[in-house]
Amino acid sequence: MLAGCDTAPGPAASATPSSAGSPVATHQSPQTSSAAPSPTLTGPDALILSGLHRFTIRPARAGQRPLAINKSGRLDVNDATTSGTPFTMTPTQGRYLIRVPEQPGTCLGLSRSAGAPNIIQATACDPGRDEQLFTVQRPTGGDPATYVISVNGTYLQATDANGLIAVELGNSSPITAFVLMDGGPVG
């Protein structure tokens, strides 16, 4: 179980085209092999997860604003002055690179510093780095419109004290669920 969500990470959402050409919802277990196929998607977020639509990420908690990359390049809980940073996804090895289309060649990645919380930082894209390959899953038994986002063994969590951080799961670690807000076609 994921504390705070009362859910555990569930199967990764995927989509496959039906014989009529429209997406059909399917689910896959998370892939662990580096040779895993890239996920394909269906359902309401299929266009986001397949990389065809831009999106912003918002903590599902009521009253939360979309996440934004701040002036130091850190992805953080948004203040009231911006509308959130738009992103696109690139399915890669069963996980996702999360790209920043307004900054070509830039992706999100995990940054670890001794004595400080793990954070998510804008960095040069490198699909070979595990710190940039995110897992985006619906929480089992949770709100079907939300996702739990993890990277390299850590889960994204919005906190009051430290903003957006990436934490390893512990017995008492609450996990933040997120909503992917569709921003329309990539153009």
Image (spheres, rainbow, N blue to C red):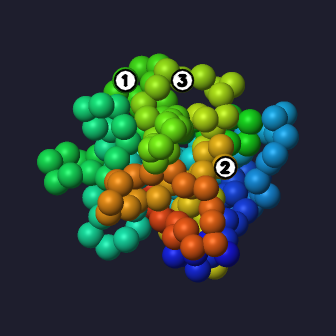
For the point 38% across and 61% down, the residue is 159
Q: Compute the Cα span from label 2 to label 1.
A: 26 Å
Q: Secondary structure at mark 1?
A: loop
Q: Is residue 31 left or right of residue 133?
A: right
**Rendered location of residue 45, percent (x, y):** 53, 56
Q: Is residue 27 left or right of residue 51?
A: right
Q: In this rendering, does residue 85 appear at all?
A: no
Above/below status of 131 relative to 138:
above
Residue 77 or 57: which is nearer the viewer? Answer: 77
Q: Quarter of the image holding residue 75?
A: top left
* Between discs 2 and 3, the one toward the N terminus: 3
* Between discs 3 and 1, the one toward the N terminus: 1
For the point 49% across and 21% down, the residue is 124
Density class for disc 2 (Cα within 10 Å; few <14, some 14-19, many ≥20) is few
Q: Secondary structure at mark 2?
A: loop
Residue picked out by circle 1: 103
Q: Secondary structure at mark 3?
A: loop
**Rendered location of residue 102, percent (x, y):** 34, 27
Give amino acid for label 2.
Answer: Gly
Residue 174 or 23: which is nearer the viewer? Answer: 174
**Rendered location of residue 184, percent (x, y):** 39, 45
Q: Compute the Cα span from label 3 to label 1.
A: 11 Å
Residue picked out by circle 3: 125
Q: Is residue 170 left or right of residue 27?
A: left
Density class for disc 3 (Cα within 10 Å; few <14, some 14-19, many ≥20) is some
* Between discs 2 and 1, the one toward the N terminus: 1
- Which mark's residue is nearer the viewer, 2 or 1? 2
Q: In this rendering, does residue 1 appear at all?
A: yes
Give amino acid for label 1.
Answer: Gln
Residue picked out by circle 2: 153
Above/below status of 136 relative to 128:
below
Q: Quarter of the image holding residue 121?
A: top left
